[in-house]
Structure formats: C-alpha cells, structure tokens
Amino acid sequence: MLSSPACSPFRLPATRSGARRRSAAARTITMRDRSKNRKPTQRGRYLSTEAIQAVQSLKRAALRGVHAASAAAAVEPKLRRLLKADMVAVFRELAAQGEALLALQVFEEIRKEHWYKPRLLWYVDLVAVLASKGLRIEVDKACSYLKREQLEPDTEGFNLLLKTLLDSGFTQLTMDCFRLMKLWDSDPDRITYTTLIKGLESLGKMELSAGIRLEAENDYGSLDFLDEVEIDDACRSSS
C-alpha cells in the first residue's frame, strides 16, 4: 500500500526558515524617496553636517529677531571650527538662499581667516544677494572691501561683477570697478565693453556710455561686435 503524500518519505517537512521566507515574500516592500533627505548642494558639492548646522543656527538666530551681526557672533566659534571649504560653502549657501545680511557677516568672518585669498566670484555672489534685497549701503560696504584687495587678473569675473552692478542700477560703483579691473591687469574684452555700453545706455547714462565707446574703438577699431556678443549667455558660461 502506497503511503499518502503527506507521509511520503520523499517529501521534506516545511521548515521554519522556509515559512519565514514565504511570509517575507508576501509582505509589501516600500522604499523611502531618498531625494527628500538630500543635503543642500553648493555649486556641485554636498554641504557637510557641520556646515548645514552652521547655516541653520544662523537662520534660527535671525528668525528670533537677533541682529545679523549678533547672530554671526553667536555662532562664531562654530564657524571658525569649519574647514575652509565648508566655511565658504556656508557663505555661498546663505547667499543662494537670499540671506543677504547673514551672508555678509559670514563673508566678513572669512576675510579674517589666515587662509583667506580673495576670489572675485565670491564678491559677485555677495553683491548680487545684497542688491537683490535693496541693501545699497551694504553693497557699498562690500565694494569697499573689494577695493582693498589684491586680485589676480580675472576678466570673466569682472564681467560678471559689472553686469551685476549695472542690473541693480549702481552706476558709480560700476565705473569704480571698471577702473579696478584695468588697475589689476584684467584686460577688458568685447563682453566687457558690450556690458558697459548697453548697460549704461539702458540706465540713461549716455555720456558715460560715449566714453566707454571711445575706449572700445581704441582697443578694437570698430564697434561691430556690439550686436554680436550675447551678454547673458557669455556671463552664464563663465560663472
């Protein structure tokens, strides 16, 4: 007589591990969207935990109504413990978030560091966020710092700075920075002259624009390039 399938010697009894595998397979697996947990980025890099904490501490102090200078002083020890790259990242993150006064205070702390070496693009970021908030006195302050620096030649950086100032209506500061540009051996190029001529004319500064036209003609012999250079595209590609 044949044994029943349940009692067949060739049929292995179900093990507990097998039961657990079947139970696990029956469960619905859900995955969290990791994009929600991504850290803020700063120009292609991730901010460190310490940098994120510094940004958050400054912003919390500002929300409590603490003056920006006091807010920066409150977290100064934390800022000074940051690595160079993280301290700069905190500054640029605050600027990107539109935290103009906080960005200015952190930038001033950066200028005190022993490793500080000025970069024109930092000034572009700072001037842009200050101007966007209508902080004209602070823009003047930032440019006064720039006038005391010793920079390497950087025509592309100056082109960005000149456009940022003109877009915000800072005529005199634009002309001051144009003089600095030549003083620091950053030779004006076609983008420089196009930015200045068109920007000044859009602000109704025809006399200043005429002077720049003469300089451009002396350098290039012709102003035909004025209708050929696309300022926005050229500035974006250099940033």
Image (spheres, rainbow, N blue to C red):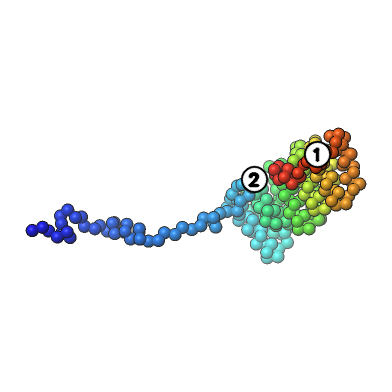
Q: Amino acid at mark 2?
A: Lys
Answer with mark 1 or mark 2, whichever residue precedes in sequence: 2
Whole-percent x, y for residue 45 in the image? 60, 47
The residue depicted at 25 percent of the width and 57 percent of the height is 15
**Left or right placement of residue 128 versus residue 50 in this view:** right
Instruction: Please determine whether, in this image, residue 161 is positioned above or below residue 15.
Output: above
| Closer-to-camera residue (238/109) | 238
Q: Which residue is mark 1?
A: 225
- Label 2: which secondary element: helix
The residue depicted at 71 percent of the width and 42 percent of the height is 238
Q: CA distance from mark 1 to mark 2?
A: 41 Å
Tell which tag, 1 or 2, sits nearer the viewer: 1
Whole-percent x, y for residue 157 in the image? 74, 42
| Closer-to-camera residue (191/92) | 191
Q: Residues within 10 Å of mark 1 (few under 14, many from 20)?
A: few
Q: Residues within 10 Å of mark 2 (few under 14, many from 20)?
A: some
Instruction: Please determine whether, in this image, residue 134 is positioned above or below residue 225.
Output: below
Q: Could you say which quadrant of the image residue 13 lies in?
A: bottom left
| Closer-to-camera residue (183/217) | 217
Q: Which residue is mark 2?
A: 84
**Left or right placement of residue 170 versus residue 33 in this view:** right
Count how many numbered circles sit on residues in the image.
2
Q: Is residue 163 visible?
A: yes
